[in-house]
Image: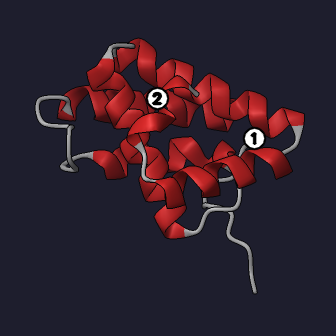
């Protein structure tokens, strides 16, 4: 991902580690959900910063797959760099929720149990 350079190193390492362990199907679902989000938010720096905020929320919450991306989108409202995008974030959340239902994806985040 081109915009990982604006993530801190710890979260970047978590994301890379998650990516390496994901199935090809989960990778495709992650990519599709990010693409849907960016089609609504815009693929400019502002839209990419929202994606990074969602990735931060995911890694800080301990998700075990990036395919959970859509479950965290609505949690980005009010976080750093999302001012003025609240309605677009909510819209993306609803559209991605439809994608997740259509593809029978989980409605709760995946967490590794230690």
Alpha carbon distance from label 1 to label 2: 29 Å
Which numbered dot is residue 19?
Answer: none
Among all residues in the image, which is located at the extreme left?
Answer: 84
The nearer-to-camera label among 1 and 2 is 2
In front of the other: 55 or 108: 55
Which quarter of the figure is the N terminus placed in? top right
**Residue 32 in the image: x percent, y percent?**
64, 23
Q: Residue at 31%, 20% (x, y): give it.
A: 45
Left or right of 93 in this view: 88: left
Across and down, in percent, residue 112 comes to: 73, 73
Rendering quarter of residue 43: top left
- Against 96, residue 16 (above or below) is below
Q: Is residue 43 above or below residue 16?
A: above
For label 2, the crowd category at 10 Å Cα-Cα, with few meaning under 14, some 14 to 19 and many 20 or more, is few
Give the answer, above or below, for where 101 lies relative to 43: below
110 sits left or right of 59 in the view:
right
SS assignment at label 1: loop
Q: Are marks 1 and 2 in contact (CB under 8 Å)?
A: no
Q: Residue at x 41, y 40 (%)?
A: 52
Q: Residue at x 66, y 34 (%)?
A: 30
Q: Residue at x 74, y 81 (%)?
A: 113
The quarter of the rendered structure image containing the C terminus is bottom right
Residue topped by disc 2:
3
* Image x and y of residue 57, in percent: 43, 57
* SS assignment at label 2: helix
Q: Is residue 52 left or right of residue 35?
A: left
Which label belongs to residue 104?
1
Left or right of 89 in this view: 55:
right
């Amino acid at each position: 991902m081109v915009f990982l350079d604006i993530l801190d190193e710890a979260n970047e390492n978590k994301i890379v580690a998650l990516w390496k362990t994901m199935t090809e199907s989960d990778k495709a679902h992650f990519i599709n959900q990010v693409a849907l989000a960016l089609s609504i938010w815009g693929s400019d720096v502002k839209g990419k910063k929202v994606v990074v905020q969602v990735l931060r929320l995911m890694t800080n919450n301990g998700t075990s797959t990036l395919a959970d991306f859509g479950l965290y989108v609505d949690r980005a409202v009010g976080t750093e760099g999302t001012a003025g995008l609240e309605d677009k974030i909510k819209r993306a959340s609803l559209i991605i929720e439809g994608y997740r239902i259509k593809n029978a994806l989980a409605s709760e985040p995946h967490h590794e149990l230690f």
